[in-house]
Image (cartoon, grey):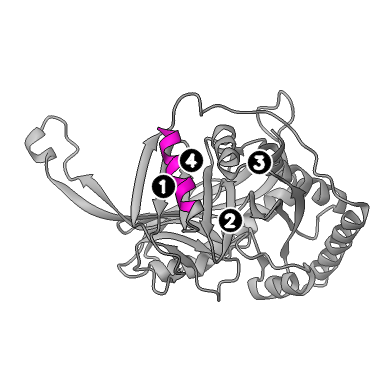
Amino acid sequence: MLSTIFDRTKVQLDESLPFVLYSKPGEHILNAMFQFDDAVHKVTDYTENGFVFAPFMADEAPILLRSDEVHSIALEDEVLGTVFKSEEAQVSAIEEERYKTLLEKAILEIKSGKCKKIVLSRYISVKQTKPVLKLFGQLLKTYPNAFCYLWYHPKVGMWLGATPEILIKTRGLEFTTMSLAGTQTQKIGENEPKWTVKELDEQQLVTDYIKEVLEHKIKEVRYSEAETVKAGHLWHLRTKITGRFSKGQLKELVTALHPTPAVCGLPLNEARSFILENEQYRRSYYTGFLGELNFKTNRTRNRNQKNQENSAYRSVTTASELFVNLRCMQLVKDNALVYVGGGVTQDSDVEKEWMETQSKAQTMLRILFS
């Protein structure tokens, strides 16, 4: 029962001990992990097992939440479903002008030839007094096809979100990642968006970058055609990338992929320098990544249903599922910090980029005001 997991979580909160609640896209299963001490454990070589929570800055070690106690339950029918409520982000004219000026500066930086793409972000501070578990329950109800999570560590903070983007998913030595870029808000009655040259080019930049960083690391890689996918009220362009990697290579893969141009820009170092010098705030865990690291799963060796005897043999496989931390907020006392951003290229329009962040903010604002 969901209430049982929530009651257990309240005890963890009362004792100021770390935990994470999460549901994977489309699975309708709530997973819970509780750590029995308040130590801050770190990921070093990606052979560790637990739930990883990593910041935007790749030179900062990710946090590992230990799986001292684990639960998984099916979400009840009444929890599932979609709540449609739109809330406009209330932002001051000063903040709007500041961000638009930053967008103009980034466009000039790109046109000068220093960068091809820069991903800019901001946050919106909103007063909120809802119980955190009520917020998370609403998140599960509203976004059943996203990676929904509530993460807490007394020495780090509390975050929750609903992200559509996989950083990397592995099973054994097989992996899947994606290039996700380009965003449009779904219009009433619209079954498929019309993508602009700017959006198509932005998505291709991310795809080309991933091809480049994987080229000499992976023996076998396959790329799908770009496709349109829907996440909540937003459309995105996505290219799926699959392949095989060598044993002990997970850390190399993750560090090659994070941060991607979809959350930072290109060239990576130049775009990151521009972000650090100009965004005027610290992203912390926004645009980092999170998820299961080296979980053990059982796999049936023989899937032939006619051979029941051999079907009894199973092998243990190590699997990881890491998601980019987008569409998220940080809870600080009575405030919710809602993080939003977007990719800027030489073809960007300042007003459209501003409105894109306003639209993306609705993912979390719907939860806060529903």
Is mark 2 in CB contact (under 8 Å) with mark 3? no
Q: Residues within 10 Å of mark 3 (few under 14, many from 20)?
A: few
Q: Which residues are magenta?
A: 1-13
Find numbered disc 2 in the image and state the secondary structure of the residue it sits on.
Answer: strand
Nearest the camera: 102 or 154? 154
Pointer 2 or 3: first along the chain: 3
Residue 171 among those drawn in magenta? no
Predominant SS along the magenta part: helix
Image location of residue 190, percent across then percent down: 70, 27
Number of other residues with Cα within 10 Å of mark 2, as a class: few under 14, some 14 to 19, many 20 or more: many
Q: Which mark is residue 130?
A: 3
Q: Earlier in the sequence, mark 1 or mark 4?
A: 4
In the rendered structure, which disc, 4 or 2, sits on the residue that comes first in sequence?
Answer: 4
For label 4, the residue is: 25
Q: Nearer the viewer, mark 4 or mark 2?
A: 2
Which residue lies under the disc numbered 1?
32
Mark 1 or mark 2: which comes first in sequence?
Answer: 1
The residue at 46%/43% (across/down) is 24
Q: CA distance from mark 4 to mark 2?
A: 21 Å
Check disc 1 and report its element: helix, strand or loop: strand
Q: Point out residue 47 in the picture as x, y percentages from the top left corner.
A: 34, 68
Compute the Cα span from label 2 to label 3: 14 Å
The disc placed on residue 158 is 2
User: How far apart, in angstroms, are the residues tagged by discs 4 and 3?
Assistant: 25 Å
Tell me residue 51's x, y (percent).
42, 58
Q: Secondary structure at mark 3?
A: loop
